[in-house]
Each structure stands twice: as C-alpha cells, then as structure tokens.
Image (spheres, rainbow, N blue to C red):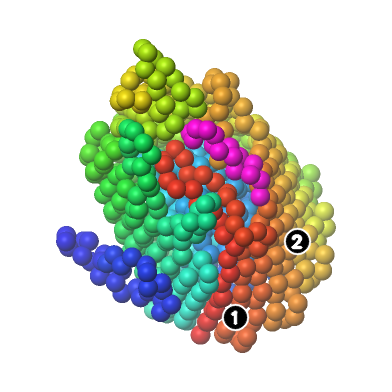
Amino acid sequence: MKPKLRLLALALALVPLPAFASPSAPDTGAPDMGAPDMGAPDMGAPDMGASGTDLLDLSLEELMDIEISSVSKRAQPLSRIPAAVHVISAEQIRRSGAANIPEALRLAPGVHVARFSNNRWSVSIRGFGGRFASKLLVLQDGRSLYSPLFSGVFWEFNDIPLELVERIEIVRGPGASLWGANAVNGVINIITRNAASAQGTQVSAAAGTELHGSLFASHGLALSDTTHLEVHARSQYVEPSSTPEDGRARDFWRTRQAGFRLDGKAAGDRFRLQGSVRDSMTGEHFMMPALAGRIPFLPANPSNELAYLLGRWDHVADGGITHSVQAYVERSRMDIVIARERRSTFDIEYQQQQRLGERVDFIWGAGWRHKRDEVVSGAPRFDSPRDRNDLFNLFAQGELELVPERWALTLGARVDRPDDARLAFQPNARILFTPDPAHSLWASAARAVRAGSRGERTVSGQLPARPLESPLTLGGNTYTRLAPRISGNPDFGHEYLDALDLGWRASWSSRLSTELAAYHYRYDDLRHAHRGALIPLAPGVLTQTLTLDSTERARVSGVELSAQWRPTDAWDLAASLSMSRLSHSSVDGPTEFTEGTPERIFTLRTGYAISPTLQWDAWLRHASATQTYAFQPALRVDPYWTLDMRLGWKASRDLELSIVGQNLLDHRHTEAINEPLPSMINEVERGAYLRADWRF
C-alpha cells in the first residue's frame, strides 16, 4: 500500500464502528468567527448550532435580517437579496429527524429529493433530476463536491455529519456569475460550524430499523483566547431495504470518517484550517452487459476513500478592503463497478471586496483548479485512462444603490476557461425594489453554463440488452432484444441556460411571512443521445449506437410558494408548494430530462413545544408521479405521500433523547428508479430510530 493510502487507512481505522453495528456488514478494511463564509469576510449571522440561538427562536423580522453569503459571496441580510434563498438551520435539521444531508435538503422549498435506495438519491432544483443530475453546484465550506465523471454529486460518498452543519444555504436559480460552471439551476452551500462554537465534548448515538447504528463524537478546546480547535469522528451503518417483489435488497450503506477544524483571529486577520479523511461502502445489485437472455443482477460494493485539507485566510486592510485567499487539496479513490477512479485536485482562489464611494459594493476574484485522474473501466469504458485538466476563472460583481433603501442594481459576470474546452462567459443582472421594510420584489436575468463531463467526452461500450416493445423483422430474421452501444463525444462542449427569475418576499406581521418565486428557463445545447442505425449483433439481438451530442433544447417554467406562520410562541408552521412544467422544442417523445422530477411538490411542517422539555414535530410531503424513459416498457413512479414524526425530550441540561418515525403512511413505496444504469429497483420502507445527544 502506498504511504499516503496507508496513512488514510490508519486514520480511518481509528474511527470505531458503533457497538451495535450489523455483524453482517462487509468488513473492508466582522471579527466574529462564528461562521465560515464561503467568501464573505464579515459573517454576522447568528450561530444556529451550539450557541442556542436558532431560526426557530427568532421573530419574522429578525429572520429577514439573517445574513446570507451564497448569493454574492459576501454577507447580506435576507431581505436585501434579489434571489430565491432558503436557510436550513442546525436546529431545523435536528427537529426534522433527518439522518443525512439529502434528507435535510427536503426542508427547503423547491428542492426535490427522491431515494433510489437506502444509499442513493436524486437531488435537484427546478427540474432535471435523476441519479446523475448535473445542473446543481454543491459546496462544503468552499470545496466543490461534484464529480468530474458526470458533473454531479455522489451523495453516498459525501456523507457530511449533520452534527457539524451550522446551516445550509440554498439558492434556487443560476449562480454561475460568481460560482462558475455547474451552478445552473441552483447552489447548495453546506456551512459547517466554527471551532469556537464546538467547545467541550459532544456524543451522539442513534439506532433503529433502517439506521441500524450511528455514532458521532467531537471535542473542542481553546488553544488561546482567539484560537480554537475541534476534532471529530463518526461511524454509521444503514440496513438494506426491500424490492417491489418483497425480496431483500442489497442497498446497505457504511461510512467512517474523522476530521478537525482550527479557527483563529488576530487584529484584522482571520484564518481557518480544516481537513477530513473518510471511507464509504455501499451495496447494490448491478446487471452487467449481456447480448442474449436476461442474466441475474450481480452483487456489487461501490466504495470511496477521500482525504482533503482546506485553508482560508482573510485580511482587512486600511480603507476597509478585504483580501481573502482559500485553497484546498483533495485526493480520492472510487470504485463504482463500471469504473475505478483515482483523482487529485488542487484549488486556489483569491477574492477582494471593497466599498466604492457611498453606494457601490464591489467584489472580484480569480481562481485556478488543477485536476489529475486515472480511470480504469470495464464496460462501458473510458477511452482515455489518464486525464489532466486546468480550469481558470475570473469574476466580478458590483451592487449599486440606485435609491438608498429602495432600489438596488447588481451586475456581475464570470469567465471560466478550461484548457480542453471553449471559454464560458456567464453574466448576471439583478434588480431589487423594497417599497417598505416588510416587502421586497426582485427580478434577475442570467446566463449559466454546464461544462461537459469526463464521461460525456470519453465513455464508450456495450450496454445490457433489453427487450424490444415488439419483435422486429430485418432481412427475414426476427429480433426481440436491443443492446445499445454508448459512444462519447470528444467535442462535447457546454450546455447553456438563459434564465429569467421574479420574486416577492413579504412579512405580513411578526408571525407570518411568505415568498413567491416564478421563473422561465430556456436551455440550449443540452445533452442528447443521437441514435444510429439498427444493426444485427447476434441471433435475436440488434445493436444501436447512441452517440452523445449537444443538440437538444428545452423550456422550463414554474412557480414556488412558501409560507412561515407562528400562531403561538410554542407552535410553528411552514408550508411550500412547487409547480413546474418542462417542454421540448427539438426532440419528439420523452428523454432523460423528462423523468426524475415531479411537476408538483408539497411540504407541510409543524413543530409544537408541549413543555419546556418536550417537543413534537411532524413533516408531511407529497410528490406527483414521474415516468422513466430508458426502461422499455416505460415504468411509472406513482404519486406518493410521506409523513415523518419526532418526539424529543430534554432529559437534563446535557442530555436529549428523541424517537423518530419516517415514512409512516405506508409500509413501503417507490420514489425513483435508477436509470439509465441497470440497477435493481428498491423501495423506501417505513422506519424508526432512537437517538441520544450528550454535551458536556
């Protein structure tokens, strides 16, 4: 074993499995420092974690003053942001009963989360969902979580402990003018807690039916009055679910990780250093390519090992000019059955923020990302085993107060220049009107780019044979099966979005607020599989080459409505409704983009403080039907309702106990089907778990 991997394995070995882990699990070896800010030098947002101040404790007027950094890379009050933004706090995550990041993202309006199995998810904003959703930028403290293999996120390999999350900022709509390619339909910014807010010892343990065992431990200490350190470790095992045929699935999920964070400040300087090592293993049944007959699904254990180190430095110079530098290095090793990837990434970005006169806030920056990888694959395969890529970027944005406290105009743009593709120019313009402190209206026009992935450029190979809808006769021979052959496109370029967003945010009283957002998106040069001629391959089997190109166009329009109401000091209600419609102007019939995302999503959450030590929460969700396109005949995912409940008891000052029930309305149901890869269909089951949290 190489020295670096040996060190990684040693660190992971120090993370113990919980005592209740399944025996059948495979054994494979402003000067306030209260929040990391993704580029904003002054983060005045309240600590929504260990300090005890939380969104649920704030009035609606105070909620409008919560500062967000994900829209403009600097702290801004929510009421002054011309975008559809939602903040998920640590307390909301805790009271929801969510057990992982994808489940927690359901707390935000307009975000669709569907489970393929107990270890795989589809997460999307405003359409284009699926296992390999590629139009969403996901960040953790400034580090991109996307995989260059498909320009999306393997959620099972990015399991961030919820105990570390201070808040999650979700921007619905393009953010490419600051964050760059892949920030097409939205940005998810996962912000972890500052080491200063994690002092003392915390231990969290959970056990139940599906969440078989989870153990988290952290310890924070003060190295000086201004420097704090936190170390943590976590291990978790999730049980397999069931198949529609009442069979036992193989979608177990095991993760182990350890990490640290160091925060400090001195005069006008602040610094942060953090890192983590992690390994993950999942299970699934996978069908390998075959020309004739239906072979059984074969067991597989996709896995991932990852280690990263991230540092950030902020300096406030004379005149209030803030200089920021952030860099990280990451190494990963992944096996996803069809491919084994080793990847190294180095990323560095410089940013400067200053005030120009009395009415202009200006921010600009530049960055460089260097990536090297090696991909060993079977079928399908990647034509170039080794790849080296450099991405350079330059961005600038200015906010001008046209009329103080009334009208504000924001103009910005970003240029991304990869060394193997054409330049991507991504402009953005936003206007904000605040007629009074309780209302704000905004509009934005933007262009965003989704860069082609490694897979789209280099993948090729035979896919499993599938039955034809009806037998086909060619040359006097009858064929009943089709074995497609996928072919990547070395010239695959960019997908483009031209977006128009409108919004209205209002506080009707100290207890009621609403937000209405509408959008119309036009997509050009979308990925499309161009179908070649049908050619005999074997007796009874035809083949057809599917060549990836970027010729498809689509339109998406939608409306999102959300409301928060606090009838009494002890009772909270939150509801959201999202409706969207996708249409194609270039392709007849369904495509991969028409499946995976329902046209209607509804959520209703309520929380009630029964007593000072007893809390009850309920969470109702609904998604309309979706339909597959790759499976023949087409498969339908029926509309479904789900209900989660949580009862929490503060047993003492240092101990909280809770019981969580999930998917309580039915024994099990299907939320999504993993396509186009031929994996077994799994169902989401009813579950429950007990949880204990100690702080001392």
Question: What is the three-letter code of the residue carrying label 1?
Answer: Glu
* Res. 674 in view: yes
Labels 1 & 2 near each other (Cβ < 8 A): no
Is 654 drawn above or below residue 244 in the view shown? Answer: below
**Which of the two residues, 38 or 495, is positioned nearer the viewer here?**
495
User: What residue is drawn where x is 16% and y is 61%?
Assistant: 1
Q: Quadrant of residue 575?
A: bottom right
Of labels 1 and 2, earlier in sequence is: 2
Q: Secondary structure at mark 1?
A: strand
**Viewed as shown, does residue 686 lie left or right of 311?**
right
Dot 2 falls on a residue whose secondary structure is strand
The residues tagged by marks 1 and 2 sit, at their Cα atoms, a distance apart of 23 Å
CA neighbours of label 2 inside 10 A, class few (<14), some (14 to 19), many (20+): some
Question: Which percent across, then down, holds residue 571?
Answer: 77, 68
Q: x and y percent of residue 625 in the render?
A: 64, 41
Q: Splitting the image into 4 quarters, where does residue 11 fall?
A: bottom left
Q: Which residue is at a point 51% across and 74% down the rendered structure image?
A: 206
Q: Report the magenta residues as a range.
A: 625-640
* x, y percent for residue 56: 69, 66
Q: Label 2 sits on what residue type?
A: Leu
Which mark identifies residue 656?
1
Residue at 55% in and 28% down? 590
* Magenta span: chief secondary structure: loop
| Mark 2 lies on residue | 573
Residue 534 counted in the magenta span: no
Horizontal and vertical percent for residue 4? 21, 61
| Residue 45 visible in this rendered orientation of the protein | no
